[in-house]
Amino acid sequence: MDQGKHTTNKGKWKQLSEKERYKIEALYDQGLNPAQIAKALTPKRDRRTIEREIRLGLVEQKRMNPSNSKYAPMYITELVYKADTAQMRREERAANKGRGLKIGHDQNLADHIERKIKCEKWSPDAIIGRLKAEGWKHSVTICTKTVYNYIDRGIFREVTNKDLWVKKCSGKKRDYKKIRTVALNNKNGRSITERPQEADDRSEQGHWEIDLVVGRQGTKAAILTLVERKTRKSLYVLVKNKTQKEVVAAIKRARRRVGGDFSEVFKTITADNGSEFLDSESIRKAAKCGEIYYAHPYSSWERGSNENGNRILRRFVPKGTDIGKLTVKELQRIEDWVNNYPRKIHGYRTANEMAA
C-alpha cells in the first residue's frame, strides 16, 4: 500500500541548497515536471517544495522563434527557472521576513517549529506547549497564536496552512441531550450509568473505551481501537471483519501485547451498542476484565475519549481507505505516534508518559 499516507517516521528536513537549485534548473531545462525533479534530487524532496521553488525562480526570457511562418514574431518570451534568481529571492525574502519579527532573532527556534510541523506532524499548539513544559530553552519566546499568525503571513520558509492537520477550533461545545433508554438490541448489557465512579471521573487507570474504525465502503477490514480514559493511551488492532468472533479474537491479541496482569490493565470496557460488541461475556473473558458497560444509543459523546482518538487516527487512515491493505507495522507506527504526541489536557505530556 502507499506508505506515504500512513507513515509517521521522523524525516530529516532542511532548506534547499544553492547546489540543489542548480540541479533543479538543469532538470527543469530537460523538461522534467516537479514530481520527477523531486524524485531525482538527493535526498528526495516533496513535490510541493519543488513547485514552490520553481515559482520562486521563474523569470521571463526572450529567444528566437523557431516558427518558419512569415507572420510569426522574430522573438518569443517564455518563463524559465533560474537557480541564481531563486537563490537571490530566497535570501532577500528571508532577510525581510526576519526584520521586526521575534522569531527572526532565533533561527534554531524557527527550524525546530518547521521540522516538527513538516516532518513529525505536530500542531503549533503541541510544539509550543511541549517547549514550555520542558522549560523554554530558546532565546525568543512566542505563543501558539503567534505561530499561526506567522504561518498565515507566510513567514516560515517551507510551512503553510496546508501542512496543518486542523488549523483552529472554535472551542464551542455541543449541547448534548442525555438519553436514558437502553438499546433494544442489548437488553442484557449493563448500562454506562452502572459504571464505577473511578471510571466516570478518570481518577484511576484501567478503564477503557472500545470502538471500530471502518474502511472503504464495500470492504470488511476495520481497526479495533481501545482508549484508556485517564491517560488517553491507545491500542490499535486490525480485524478482518466486524463480526463478534473477530472482535473477541482481536481483544485476545491486544491482551497478549499488553502482557502482565491484564485484569489490572483492563478493569472495565465501555462500548457502544453495535452488534459486534453485544457478546459482553465473551469480550469480558477475552479481556479478563471486570465488566463491560454500554453507552446510551446515539450518544457517542459518552465515549468522548474514543471519539477524539478516532479523529486523530483518521489523520493517517482517512475515510475511504482500504484498511485491508494496511500492515501491522504501519498501524504500529501510527499507534506509536498517537501515544507519543503531547496532549494539552495532560499539560503537554504524552499518553505514554502518563501511563508510565
Image (cartoon, rainbow, N blue to C red):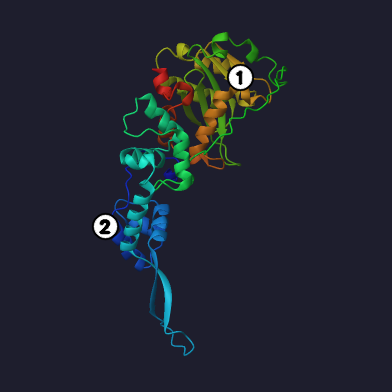
Which is closer to the viewer, label 2 or label 1?
A: 2
From the top left corner, tell me how far across and down residue 352 is, in percent.
40, 22
Front one among 293 and 76: 76
| Number of other residues with Cα within 10 Å of mark 1, as a class: few under 14, some 14 to 19, many 20 or more | some
- Label total for image: 2
From the top left corner, tell me how far across and down residue 239 is, in percent.
52, 31
Front one among 287 and 208: 208
From the top left corner, tell me how far across and down residue 270 is, in percent.
58, 18
Task: Label 1, secondary structure: give it.
Answer: loop
Image height of 106 relative to 87, above or below = above
- Looking at numbered disc 1 in the image, what kind of residue is underneath it? Asp
Which residue is at a point 67% across and 20% down the rendered structure image? 296
Q: Can residue 123 be seen in this view?
A: no
Q: Do the residues labelled 2 and 1 touch (CB within 8 Å)?
A: no
In the drawing, what numbered circle is on residue 19? 2
Image height of 234 relative to 36, above or below = above
Which residue is at a point 58% across and 24% down the rendered structure image? 304
Task: Label 2, secondary structure: give it.
Answer: helix
- Which residue in the protein does label 1 denote? 279
C-alpha gap between disc 2 and disc 1: 63 Å
Q: Which badge, 2 or 1, is on the more N-terminal residue?
A: 2
